[in-house]
Image (cartoon, grey):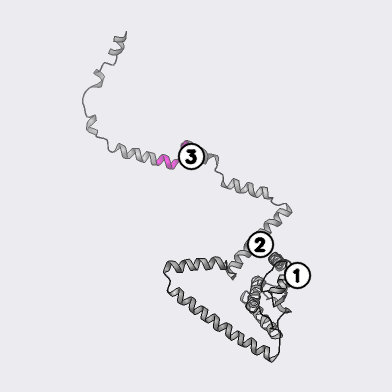
Amino acid sequence: MSDHIEEQEMEAEALSAIFDTAFTIRSSTQPFQWSIKLVPIDCGDDLEEEESSNHVMVNLVATIPLDYPEVSLPELDVEILKGLSPDNRKELVTLAQEEAAANEGMPALFAVCEAVREWLADNNVKGLDDASMHAQMMRKAKEVERKEAQAAQQFEAQKTIDEMTEAEKEELAVRKRREEGTPVTQETFTIWWDNFCTEMEEKKDEETGEITSEEKEKKRVMADRNTGFEIFSEKSGVFNLEKLEAAAEEIENDVGDVDEELFDDDEDLDDLDFDSDDDDDD
């Protein structure tokens, strides 16, 4: 059970770091309950800009079961803050539950928040909370018009891509990736989550005094430093066995090319007088 609590608390820390003041802990005792305010356009701390730019906004409320995330899914609800109808709320609750189920067995709330926020961004228009018959007809007409425009745009984009060279297609793909950034998928979130958990563990170790940042830096430097034997071997070459073996093999190959007939002369070197020059000097 303690493992579940620790993982839930770490997810709360991650959500707090991502959403800042938009993240609220409604219940700090189990079962935990968290709330995240979601808007189509993030305006930071500028409340006036947020109010004018966002025609819809909600609170995503998550009640965390004791055995989440390994076994159970979070209990999700949506509170309308601005611009949405009860039918929109039902649609968002269904969307949130489906996204949570798609991430079963792992921390899922960030992915759920992203799915809800994307829906809000696609429906950031005035009047969605108007339940009159006329308003509903107008919304349906606008939705049909929006889909037709989107289909036409996709057709033109595909037509343009088909006429491009391979180099132009590659350049377009690179530019698109730069504009979109790294998409939030289960794989990218898992990588981010693992890095975050590692960072939190290191922070906890530093706080408990098990390892300081200076000690970590010292370990890193020592790991990259050559040993005394390696330094001496590299400078003197005496104990560098690989270099010695290579040099010996090279000498052996050179010796094999010596002309032995040059040394077949029968002249007796013992008859040479090496002392004549010394006697003349005397």
Mark earlier in primary sequence (2, 3) = 2
- According to the image, label 1 marks what residue? 24
Considering only vertical position in the picture, is 85 above or below 42?
A: below
Mark earlier in primary sequence (1, 2) = 1
Residue located 33% across and 38% down the image: 252
Considering the numbered disc 2 on the image, is that residue within a helix, a strand or a loop? helix
Q: Residues within 10 Å of mark 3 (few under 14, many from 20)?
A: few
Q: Position of residue 274 (x, y in %)?
A: 28, 16
- According to the image, label 2 marks what residue? 197
Q: Position of residue 196 (x, y in %)?
A: 65, 62
Q: Position of residue 133 (x, y in %)?
A: 68, 91
Q: Amino acid at mark 1?
A: Thr
Where residue 119 sits, quadrant-wise, is: bottom right
Residue located 49% across and 79% down the image: 155
- According to the image, label 3 marks what residue? 234
Q: How much space separates mark 1 and mark 3, taking CA atoms? A: 60 Å
